[in-house]
Amino acid sequence: MNAKPAVLVTGGAGYIGSHAVLALRDAGWPVVVIDNLTTGFPFAVPDDIPLIEADIADQPVVEAALREHNIGAIMHFAGSIIVPESVENPLKYYHNNTAKSRSLIESAVRCGVRHFIFSSTAATYGVPEVSPVREDCPQRPINPYGMSKLMTEIMLEDVSKAHPLNYCALRYFNVAGADPQARSGQSTAGATHLIKVAVEAALGKRDHVAVFGTDFDTPDGTGVRDYIHVSDLAAAHVLALEALIAEPGRSHRLNCGYGRGFSVLEVLDTVDRVTNRPIERRIEGRRAGDPPSLISDNGEIVKRFAWRPHHDDLAKIITDALRWEQRLDELRDRKA
């Protein structure tokens, strides 16, 4: 069997990227991380993994890294991810998520990288006409975040037709939880992810959790989302890499979710049960750009990659997030 090619992970010091680094490392892939550390943390990258502090739009630095480390594949996680912020500041998202991705793709082509895995999003679907959402559903984003990601998907499709590069765009649903061994997790201060916010509230780091909208067309009126454990998502990236290498002429656009949804209130009820610490809930108006429900049809990724989730349980996701939050306190105390 041929040696595994080295993988460059952009945004590898961030939440999802750091879990992909762990999954690659655990599976024996050579890994290099590039991260500008705007939202990433050096402690999230294992000591034996090279960390290059740079922006993905700095093409001389990126291309030097690609050549020096003989990179054969890129996993691209770097970008901005907050939907309401994208509505307020669309140019930031088209710059960080679209223009910088274009620079990275160009660097990949220049340096002969053959495989590219892209961190896309279910937000590219907008408000789906059907639920669960299939990959062939229309992509009509309702916010600049989703549009900025869709534009990168389109770029990859066009580039793959013109150059010897295949790609996999993985459309995430709501990513949550943390590494079961507490090696990494969601570490960003002021994060907006519901489970992260709820766990912080349960530990007394926030005095309440805002519920944005109770008048959606859903069973209890609150938004419904498909929550996927971050370690299951990271495993999907490793399988995607293997598939790209096995079939160099084939690319993929696939959903990453569990195929079932939980409402905001159901999530908060589960956090209450797991922590035995009831959280104060404050009802607020809907946020701009929020669809009422987003649930994946994950049949394609299961079929193509033989992907099998191992952490498909809401209480498990919350328990791992809680354990990481407590570990994060230890890391911060040690740093202080």
Image (tube, rainbow, N blue to C red):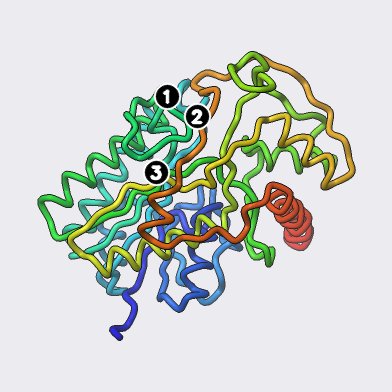
- Mark closer to the chain start, 3 or 2: 2
Residue labelled with disc 2: 83
Tell me: 237 left or right of 247.
right
**Image quarter of the C terminus:** bottom right
- Most distant residue in the left direction: 162
- Mark closer to the chain start, 2 or 1: 2
* Secondary-structure class at tag 3: strand
**Residue type marked 1:** Asn
Residue labelled with disc 1: 143
Q: CA distance from mark 1 to mark 3?
A: 14 Å
Find residue 223 and report its image quarter: top right
Tell me: 312 left or right of 30.
right
Residue labelled with disc 3: 120
Q: CA distance from mark 2 to mark 1?
A: 7 Å
- Mark closer to the chain start, 1 or 3: 3
**Residue type marked 2:** Val
* Secondary-structure class at tag 1: loop
Horizontal and vertical percent position of residue 266:
72, 33
Q: CA distance from mark 3 to mark 2?
A: 13 Å
Q: Residue drawn 46% across and 69% down?
A: 24
Horizontal and vertical percent position of residue 45:
54, 65
**Mark 3 nearby-residue class (10 Å; few <14, some 14–19, many ≥20):** many
